[in-house]
Amino acid sequence: MHQPLKQRPIYLDNHATTPLDPRVLEAMLPYFSEHFGNPASVNHLYGWEAEAAIQHAREILAGSIHATPEEIVFTSGATESNNLAIKGVAEAYLDKGRHIISLATEHRAVLDPCRYLERLGFEITILPVKSDGLVDLMTLEKALRADTILVSMMAANNEIGVLQPLTEIGAICHQHQVLFHTDGAQAIGKISLDVDAMKLDLVSFTAHKAYGPKGIGALYVRRKNPRVKLAPQLHGGSQERGIRSGTLYTPQIVGFGEAVKLAMTELESETQRLIELREKLWQTVSILDGIYLNGHPTKRLAGNLNISVAGVDGQALMLGLQTVMAVSSGSACTSAKIEPSHVLTAIGRSESLAYAAIRFGMGRFNTQDEITQVAEKTVETIQALRGGLKNT
């Protein structure tokens, strides 16, 4: 049975998923009922309505990244987009090479497809990151080879919120005629993206990180300078120019478009509001000793604060917080085995600090009062776990 709303913990896990904005739901609802047509049905009104709605969403997404609508391919989410980009390039560019470069802090939806390709004979170079989570550009340039076909580095990290220097990475890749893919799942609607200025060739997106519905994503595929070739990973129809087969999910796509439109409209004001919430929380918590900020202090998502807490048990810390807030730890559960976050260990955190990490993901519906409660509860819990000792 669900808890009454007033008793539910404050939601601060907006990097995992965001609540559906009521305005997005309102835009979606007609496409579940009266406008239910198949967008591929081109001979009658029902199909035309659905196709027009999808085209409108496609234009919104394209406009948000300075692309053209024809360069947007709809998928089921960022995981599928990442797989389509990485495996699709690998298969399409076999004649050029079999070398791919990525980062140690990437999401598993990038690292796992790379490892899959490695088993098929591709060579994968996983670059380290600096202690602030950023890539070393000189290391990247030295890693490029004549047979390198793709560099995949995420725009915004899902754990520590770090923003990679996309423009600089893109310029290096473009100079060496290597395709550049970025996982933009955490970036859409939160930072400005310009595929031409940043020399982005492939960008993965998902709606549910931007107050849109789950189960819908997109992949930007550059059509000129250079024209990117992709081998389809799903076969069975001609949808999405043959790149991704399957009947398009009109209500989800409509919601995706509406979510991006709202996010881009409110981008500047919301970014500033979230920075204020983040800094309020950090200033309160960082008064304690042994609190470590994970990731670059400013080159990060506005709503992200990831900290490690020395001198406490990670599991006990999460248990102590969960009555007041819904947050994530830096640990990941893989095959029922608890392991320290690969992102935190990649930036040099010890195993104990990686376990004792909290990822605060602030979002559109969080308030100043909530952050005050969260900050006080976090300090109180840490002090209790340390035996009630306070700073002197």
Image (cartoon, rainbow, N blue to C red):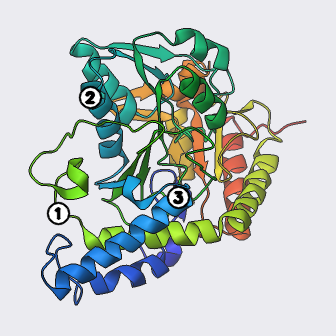
The numbered disc on residue 92 is 2
Where in the figure is residue 253, as x and y percent of width and height?
A: 34, 68
Residue with the mark numbered 1: 247
Residue sitting at x 59%, y 18%: 350
Q: Nearer the viewer, residue 33 or 201?
A: 201
| Picture layout, residue 191 above or below residue 60 | above
Q: Amino acid at mark 2?
A: Ala
Q: Are marks 2 and 1 in contact (CB under 8 Å)?
A: no
In which quadrant of the rendered view does residue 230 lie?
top left
Where in the figure is residue 130, as x and y percent of width and height?
A: 66, 20
3D distance between C-alphas at marks 3 and 2: 50 Å
- N-term-proximal mark, 2 vs 1: 2
Q: Nearer the viewer, residue 50 or 304?
A: 50
Quadrant of the image containing the N terminus: bottom left
In which quadrant of the rendered view does residue 41 lie?
bottom left
Residue at the left extreme of this rendering = 236
At label 2, counting other C-alpha atoms closer than 10 Å, the crowd grade (few under 14, some 14-19, many 20 or more) is some
In the shown orientation, is residue 32 left or right of residue 141?
Answer: left
Residue with the mark numbered 3: 323
Quadrant of the image containing the C terminus: top right
